[in-house]
């Protein structure tokens, strides 16, 4: 039976074919909600509707990792601008928009578009990014399997500004640039009882390891604790990482890491046999419940390679309220990656987006070294309060 299934998958994989190119103007996908479509376009869309066989192929592509006919055709469609009119994603989107958008359209159309986007990201990431970027606001970001390289449709960017050289101390071959602040509206976060309890415990652990507490309440008090620790004379990034790792270990108590290491990371008897295949996905599903006190709402999604095990923070509370790249880097991203790798036995990559304040967590994905990580710009954020504090104290260093 296994050989028969493999044979069927191989045949399905080998019969890939391309469809004939049609004109993008015939598809009429400027924005279907703002102008009526011609009868020819409607007939064309209905003729291209996906039947049960196509739905089955998408399931094979999404869950079996098979590069099916539909995925190959979609990848080809996005390989050149002249071919994009043959994209099934565009045609499905046209049908969805004609029915009033994702919230009111036939759920099967939305589901199949989501399946096709998920299959595309697994087999051709560049084509996926181009498709998602081209459609922009026509697809809700919640419907995209991954958003880390997809521009936010409502963002606006200011021109970068130069860093004050006196602040940096000395000269460099190239001036650093300040990174424009996020221009999306701030979010007002609500905390449930669990969030308040976890934040209180977390803050007490930070105070224990730093010797400093803040009179401010909530996340603002935690950020003041972190910033005070960062600004201490001769402070190092490594010391900040160690402080956060010790805090995370205390938050998990001595009970949780051994359980996680056994059933998720596969560390048994001093040897590591995992991580088990379910560890990234299960971690991404459980984490949002215990994560909101620090970063706000988050939800499981796909990693950059299309695999399960991703988690996206819609708008990071820690980054929004701190406005500081250095706090983000040295008291969140880097220590979290190190904690999961060393204490829990599961690789983790954290990719913050400073333009949107979204943040992608990819469990099971090995992170790049800091110097090779494109997610961290070299300069500070324009409105960084830590940089201003350094200026006032005449400390010749940056917070990041």
Image (tube, helix red, strand yellow):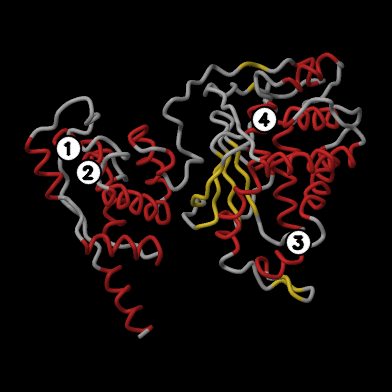
Q: Nearer the viewer, mark 1 or mark 4?
A: 1
Residue occupied by mark 3: 257
Q: Nearer the viewer, mark 3 or mark 4?
A: 3
Give whichever of 202, 209 is nearer the camera. 202
CA separation, marks 2 and 1?
7 Å
Q: Nearer the viewer, mark 2 or mark 4?
A: 2
User: SS of the residue at dot 3?
Assistant: helix
Residue occupied by mark 2: 91
CA separation, marks 3 and 4?
34 Å
User: SS of the residue at dot 1?
Assistant: helix
Give whichever of 62, 34 is nearer the camera. 34
| Marks 2 and 1 close (CB-CB < 8 Å) | yes
Give whichever of 164, 68 is nearer the camera. 68
Q: Is residue 105 above or below residue 33?
A: below
Whether residue 202 sits left or right of residue 26 in the image: it is right
CA separation, marks 3 and 2?
48 Å
10 Å crowding of disc 3: few (<14), some (14-19), many (20+)? some
Res 221 → quadrant = top right
| Marks 1 and 4 close (CB-CB < 8 Å) | no
CA separation, marks 1 and 4?
43 Å
Residue occupied by mark 1: 27
Sequence-earlier tag: 3 or 4: 3
């Amino acid at each position: 039976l296994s050989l028969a299934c493999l044979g069927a998958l191989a045949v399905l994989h080998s019969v890939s074919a391309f469809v004939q190119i049609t004109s993008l103007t015939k598809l009429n996908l400027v924005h279907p909600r703002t102008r009526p479509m011609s009868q020819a376009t409607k007939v064309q869309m209905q003729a291209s509707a996906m039947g049960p066989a196509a739905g089955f192929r998408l399931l094979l592509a999404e869950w079996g990792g098979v590069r099916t006919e539909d995925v190959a055709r979609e990848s080809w469609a996005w390989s050149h601008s002249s071919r994009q009119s043959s994209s099934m994603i565009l045609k499905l989107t046209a049908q969805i928009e004609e029915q009033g958008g994702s919230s009111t359209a036939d759920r099967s159309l939305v589901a199949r578009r989501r399946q096709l986007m998920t299959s595309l990201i697994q087999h051709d990431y560049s084509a996926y990014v181009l498709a998602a970027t081209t459609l922009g606001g026509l697809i809700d970001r919640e419907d995209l399997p991954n958003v880390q390289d997809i521009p936010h449709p409502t963002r606006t960017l200011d021109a970068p500004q130069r860093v004050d050289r006196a602040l940096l101390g000395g000269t460099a071959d190239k001036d650093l640039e300040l990174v424009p602040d996020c221009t999306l509206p701030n979010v007002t976060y609500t905390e449930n009882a669990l969030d308040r309890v976890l934040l209180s415990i977390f803050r007490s652990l930070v105070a224990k390891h730093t010797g400093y507490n803040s009179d401010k309440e909530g996340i603002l008090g935690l950020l003041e604790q972190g910033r005070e620790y960062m600004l201490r004379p001769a402070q190092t990034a490594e010391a900040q990482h160690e402080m956060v790792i010790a805090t995370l270990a205390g938050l998990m108590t001595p009970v949780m890491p051994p359980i996680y290491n056994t059933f998720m990371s596969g560390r048994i008897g001093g040897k590591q046999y995992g991580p088990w295949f379910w560890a990234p996905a299960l971690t991404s599903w459980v984490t949002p419940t215990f994560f909101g006190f620090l970063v706000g709402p988050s939800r499981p999604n796909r990693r950059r390679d299309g695999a399960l095990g991703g988690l996206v923070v819609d708008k990071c509370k820690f980054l929004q309220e701190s406005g500081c790249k250095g706090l983000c880097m040295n008291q969140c991203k880097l220590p979290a990656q190190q904690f999961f790798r060393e204490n829990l036995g599961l690789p983790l990559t954290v990719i913050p987006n400073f333009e949107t304040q979204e943040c992608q967590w990819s469990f099971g994905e090995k992170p790049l070294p800091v110097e090779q990580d494109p997610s961290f710009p070299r300069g500070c954020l324009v409105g960084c309060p830590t940089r201003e504090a350094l200026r006032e104290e005449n400390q010749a260093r940056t917070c990041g």
